[in-house]
Image (tube, rainbow, N blue to C red):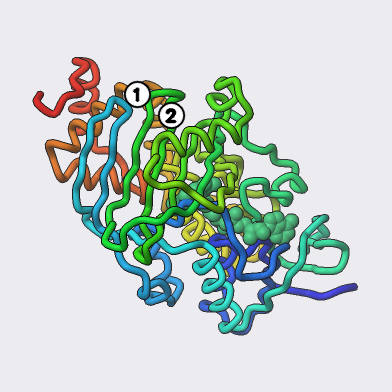
Amino acid sequence: MGEEWDLAVVGAGPAGSAAALRAAQLRPDLRVLLLDRSGFPRDKPCGDGIAAHGRDELALLGLPALIDDYRPTPRLTVVSPGGLRVSAEAARPNHVVPRRVFDARLVEAARARGVEVRRHRVRELVPDGSWVVLDGRLRARTVVAADGANSAVRRFIGLPAAAERHTALAVRGYADVPESDDVQLIAMQRAGWPAYAWSFPIGDGTANVGFGMLLPRLRAAGAPGRQVLHGRLAELLPDRPARELRAHHLPLSTGRPAPGAGRVLLAGDAAGLINPLTGEGIYYALLSGRLAAEAALESPGDPLTRYRGKLRGALGRHLRTTDVLARLAQSPGFIDAAIATAARRKEVFDLLVEVGLGAGTVPAPLALAVGLRWLRGATGLSR
Ligand SMILES: Cc1cc2nc3c(=O)[nH]c(=O)nc-3n(C[C@H](O)[C@H](O)[C@H](O)COP(=O)(O)OP(=O)(O)OC[C@H]3O[C@@H](n4cnc5c(N)ncnc54)[C@H](O)[C@@H]3O)c2cc1C
């Protein structure tokens, strides 16, 4: 008959660990299993940028000090596709923490809270009445699928992978920088737009640097993807030669699938929850993992309906906003206009950060102001 679990979580990245941590936090008596094909610590190709909103989620999970030993990086510089540069202090600082460290800390916290953590690659999932059976021997009342961008579980429950037009590919590496460098740089590129390079200093004399673009644009570049990504990164950040280069897919929220089926709930990248404007996904992974666990606990008979409602409540308006903005942002002129507006008005800069890194939406008057600027083709700071 195999083992029985109240909740089984597949994948121990931020989404999976958040689900396991939340379940154990709310109901220490529950049997919670957290599975990952890798042992921890393990690397995950990522920009390592953790938005302030991600820290809010850590606090909700009972881990407010998890990354306090990393230096906050409040300063942000954004270069628009047309070359307009805006620098400002973010309303709340972000952090840069290598995923090798961050994910292992989350897994360790889950283990300390009583979660059973196992190295195990899930290869099969079969619904069986009020149970879900993993690999023929692990029975769970609810499964949270947090197995990342190329989720196998999503495939097992019959949901398609994201279409290429909703998927980006990005490469990241590490480069030496002065220890005093404390500016997060995002440099957007008109060539192959939407595309951007970043440099996120960690605070220890290294920075996470990378470059990403949409898959169809990458294919259209006419050279092998690796060559294009590595080449553009070296060209855009010539003073920061990168080592440990690794690439990975980003399933953008514009192509998000249904958030699960039956007793299987998708969270994080498996649910296609990456911001299409910035590539930010850690906050959405922590948030959706937490909500999936809450749904499983609150509504064990029908966790999916509860989960849908929770996701809609937390992110519905935001996702609709970024769906529209991502379409408008196909035109680099729109982003130029938005950044030109942000350069003149700090409250707009803060709002764009909320939309790009959090659950923010755009008030109608601001949408109108940006739209008018876009129509006028006004991309200069002087106007
Ligand atoms: C180059 C790059 C840069 C990025 N930069 C940023 C950034 O700076 N800030 C940000 O917020 N987001 C960034 N993102 C997005 C961010 O990395 C993801 O959104 C985030 O990792 C999602 O977390 P997750 O828990 O859903 O999935 P993951 O972190 O991918 O974790 C999935 C886990 O599932 C495990 N797994 C997979 N298959 C199985 C299986 N069959 N059985 C068991 N385990 C399995 C994997 O081993 C893995 O540990 C970036 C992405 C890329 C590719």
Question: What residue is rendered at 43% in x and 34% in y?
Answer: 235
Res. 348 in view: yes
The percent position of residue 335, horizontal first and vertical second, equals 30, 29
- Pointer 2 residue Cβ closer than 8 Å to ligand 1: no
If you read the primary sequence from the N terminus, does the residue marked by circle 2 or circle 1 appear first? 2
Q: The disc labelled 2 sits on which kind of residue?
A: Pro
For the residues bearing labels 2 and 1, Cβ distance under 8 angstroms: yes
User: Which residue bears the numbered disc 2?
Assistant: 194
Circle 2 SS class: loop
Q: Residues within 10 Å of mark 2 (few under 14, many from 20)?
A: many
Horizontal side of 337 relative to 65 (left or right) equals left
Please give the name of the residue rendered at 34% of the width and 37% of the height, measured from the top-left corner: 187
The residues bearing labels 2 and 1 have C-alpha atoms spaced at a distance of: 8 Å
Q: Is residue 144 visible?
A: no
Q: The N terminus appears in which quarter of the rendering? A: bottom right
Q: Residue at x 56, y 48 (%)?
A: 245
Ligand 1 positioned in quadrant: bottom right
On the image, the x and y values in percent for residue 17 come to 57, 67
Give the farthest residue toward the top. Answer: 376
Q: Quadrant of residue 324?
A: top left
298 displayed left or right of 198: right
Which amino acid is tagged 1?
A: Pro
- From the image, tell me which residue sits under label 1: 332
Q: Please give left or right for residue 179 compared with residue 60 in the image.
A: left
Up-down: is 368 above or below 258? above
